[in-house]
Image (spheres, rainbow, N blue to C red):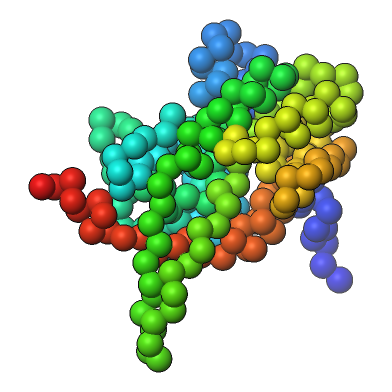
Amino acid sequence: MSDWSLPELLSALHDNVQHQLGTASRTLVHAPAKGDASESIWLKLLDRYLPRRYRATSAHVVDSKGEFSEQIDVVVFDRQYSPLIFEYQGQTIIPAESIYAVFEAKQTVDASKIKYAQKKVGSVRRLHRTSLPIPHAGGVYPPKPLPNILGGVLALRSDWTPALGNPLRKVLLREVGDGRLDIGCIASEGIFALERDGSYAWFSEEPKSATAFLFELIARLQVQATVPMIDVRAYAKWLR
């Protein structure tokens, strides 16, 4: 019989994330440095454990009309079918069609930070996305309907007591448009998510919340399947 323990493996994954977030909070003095460290910790988690078709990075998102999102802390995007990933002066710029999910990373969350995350998510969802018909051996599939871009927030702790309760639910459900947050993790407390129609927010006080969040995110990405086929010529028109 094997000496391996799946519960211990899953627990260790969460413990490592929470330990790193806590260390950054305790040891880094300046708020920007804490923010950068938190962002880096979540990015490493996603880039390591998501399937390889997905990548995670900090980036701006651009559409074929030349509009840009705000800077996004954590962008989960397609790398298998995305031909246009721009790197310029240390910044990454990703076309809107390639985006699966976007997250704001914070040390703590409160009403103002949730609203700020909603604003960031909305700046991505409002971008224009193309979707071309898909050729295949027997003909052509119609353009894929544009999937919902997942939006969320990632943090170590909450300023609310209880952390997962009605104050959080109210601020989440108040935004039902482009800034809606679908999923989030408060590493010291648990995870939250919205039903797909945005009608209800559910909370789970998970002792291993980083691992629970990772599993819930993967499950939602599986439902999305593949990003739409990008119209590269719509971007090429900017060469003229």
Q: How many marks?
A: 0
Q: Position of residue 130 (x, y in %)?
A: 38, 57
The reply to whether residue 185 is visible in this rendering is yes
Residue at coordinates 55% horizontally, 49% vertically from top-left? Answer: 149
93 relative to 80, above or below: above
Left or right: where does residue 116 sit relative to residue 65? right
Give the residue at the far top of this rendering.
29
Could you say where residue 213 lies in the image, as x and y percent from the top left? 72, 45
**Quadrant location of the N terminus?**
bottom right
Q: Nearer the viewer, residue 231 or 61?
A: 231
Residue 89 vertical position relative to residue 197 in the rendered view, above or below: above
Q: Based on the displayed image, in which of its 4 quarters is residue 50 positioned?
A: bottom right
Residue 18 in view (yes/no) = no
Judging depth in this view, the residue of 59 and 194 nearest the camera is 194
**Extreme bottom residue here?**
138
Q: Residue placed at 30% from the left, 31% from the top?
A: 90
Residue at left offset 60%, top offset 28%: 117
Q: What is the quadrant of residue 208 in the picture?
A: top right
> With 110 as the anchor, is 163 left or right in this view?
right
* Residue 207 in the figure: left or right of residue 172: right
Camera-side residue: 60 or 64?
Answer: 64
Relative placement, left or right, of 41 versus 231 is right
| Residue 185 percent across, percent down from the top left | 72, 36
Residue 236, how many percent across, how many down? 20, 53
